Amino acid sequence: MKVVLAGDADATGWGRWRAELAAAMPEAEWFTRDELAAARVPAAEVVAAVVASPPPGSLVGLPNLRLIQSLWAGVDRLLADPTLPEGVPLARMVDPAMSAAMAETALWAVLALHRGFFAYQRRQREGRWQLHAQRRADEVRVLVLGQGAMGHAVMQRLAPLGYRVQGWRRDGTALAAALAANEIVVNLLPLTPATRGLLDARAFAALPPGAAVVNLARGAHVVDADLLAALDAGHLRHAVLDVFHQEPLPAAHPFWHHPQVTVLPHAAASTDPRSASAVVAANLRALRDGRPLAHLVDRGRAY
Amino acid sequence: MKVVLAGDADATGWGRWRAELAAAMPEAEWFTRDELAAARVPAAEVVAAVVASPPPGSLVGLPNLRLIQSLWAGVDRLLADPTLPEGVPLARMVDPAMSAAMAETALWAVLALHRGFFAYQRRQREGRWQLHAQRRADEVRVLVLGQGAMGHAVMQRLAPLGYRVQGWRRDGTALAAALAANEIVVNLLPLTPATRGLLDARAFAALPPGAAVVNLARGAHVVDADLLAALDAGHLRHAVLDVFHQEPLPAAHPFWHHPQVTVLPHAAASTDPRSASAVVAANLRALRDGRPLAHLVDRGRAY
């Protein structure tokens, strides 16, 4: 089975991934487009592509492609490529190890917001010793936007600690009502035309005073100016942001030095080549054996 | 039943505590020493004391005292009072809500250390977007010093997330061997003559390079100069410190502005009057009814 590798999986290119993919599926052959050309392998022999933020056009000219497997959980940028071959099944990365990593980040953020650890860290920089009131976890209501594998993993980690956890998905209950009933919002929605800009002035106004926002999904879910206004007006207490409209976050962006914003460099949950390669291999073997493919994207709903 | 309140339970004196104690045990009468004198209640009628960091001498002249119930989990300062009535049973505060609060703080610190969130927060202040490698929880070994209610609560929260958790108690395995096998140490030991200064240069040297220390017990467990030397030598990566030799931490102390030290103002787990008052009432009723008292301190081992 010949598989094309497209995009840049990490800073080392495909170096580490290639070793893990080969170990997970020794019977497959892996080529970048350049390697395919250099080895004079006919493009028609390629049946699958493993992609990591491929530049637009990366998959053009592969007439027998039967699976596009993303290494990332989000496929919004992939779907924005007008040359993406139509009618070819497209699979997202769904890896329990990645969901666990996301849940760790969400848990850290919720614990820090609930117990006021960001405030204590600010006070440390000011050399201020000042205790604030301590609340129990069962007094804190957390709303998790998005009910995919990651949203569920987050809820499963928060609930045993006593947090009152509510899940929300589009087409479920009204967003404003869900926001009004919770003081911490963790966003894990897919980015689609229906969710872009969902966290805007209206959404923030629906949250109770002193609420906090944790965005671990996509920068474009948030209207930055509205978030800054809600923080500066004192309505929101804090924001933990892992994702941004432009990444890396531009040096001049006010998020960088806002005292109530915690900026992470898209670090909430990286795909781990060790476990993700097994997920890729399982889907490629399903393709080879004619079994159902896993984690397929519905292009109509865009996730 | 007449009960003396000694010390300062919180910034409001006994204000909030008095309401919770009265609700938990309406049949008891609560007096500070001043109130006792003002009401001309004979000191001989007082059978129990509820204490919160009482100044030395606070319990002198109460001839029929049969229980000293601390509101705090640690009784090291209480035992250091040479006037503390001998032979009177002394009970620590053991409250599941307090153990849960401690576990939240430990979990937050371990998550932050494991995933490098303190490093990301430092980079944010420098305006630096830089991702570091992500490890799975099952690649991180955590040592919990102290195997009381709080140590167990911490271990019970860490293990389900996948961390490799080891507990240690004095008189168990050698400390150096336990330290050598773990990269994050969470200290929840009682402060006794045997544990004072336990976290010193030798202990830090036993930890693997890049290890981190979380001290949630007592400042005197740590030799500050040794910790700073281990951080500055690059042997230790980070320390999260909630407790200090002197509290509030003096303004000139190097911990305040050390980039690899997170300072909390003794905030890891405050006694919650709502749940702790029920613990106090249960022990006072046991005293009244002649049933066994709970959470008694062995003055010989000092906890």
Image: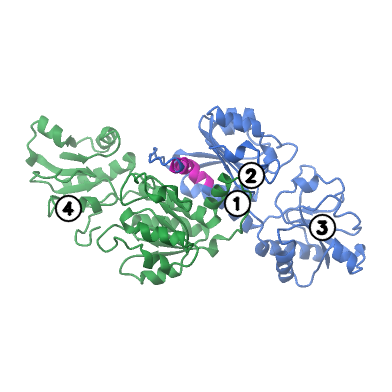
Chain colours: A blue, B green
The amino acid type found where label 3 is placed reads Leu
Query: Who's the residue at 90% across and 58% down the image?
Result: A62
Give the foreground label among 4 and 1.
1
Residue A215 - label: none
How far apart in space, not on screen, are marks 3 and 4 (Cα)? 73 Å
What x and y, as percent, mark residue B25? 24, 38
Q: Chain of mark 3?
A: A
The amino acid type found where label 4 is placed reads Pro
Residue identifier under label 3: A67
Q: Is residue A118 magenta?
A: yes
* Whether residue A167 is visible: no
Q: Chain of mark 4?
A: B
Q: Chain of mark 2?
A: A
Residue identifier under label 2: A188
* Whether residue B88 is visible: yes
Residue identifier under label 4: B89
Instruction: Looking at the image, tell me whether mark 1 or mark 2 is earlier in sequence order.
Output: 1
| Along the line of sight, the residue nearer the viewer: A239 or B225 | B225
How far apart in space, not on screen, are marks 1 and 2 (Cα)? 9 Å
Q: Quadrant of residue B55?
A: top left
- Residue B68 lies left or right of residue B250; in this view the side is left
Give the residues in magenta: A109-124
Instruction: Looking at the image, tell me whether mark 3 or mark 1 is earlier in sequence order.
Output: 3
Q: Secondary structure at mark 2?
A: loop
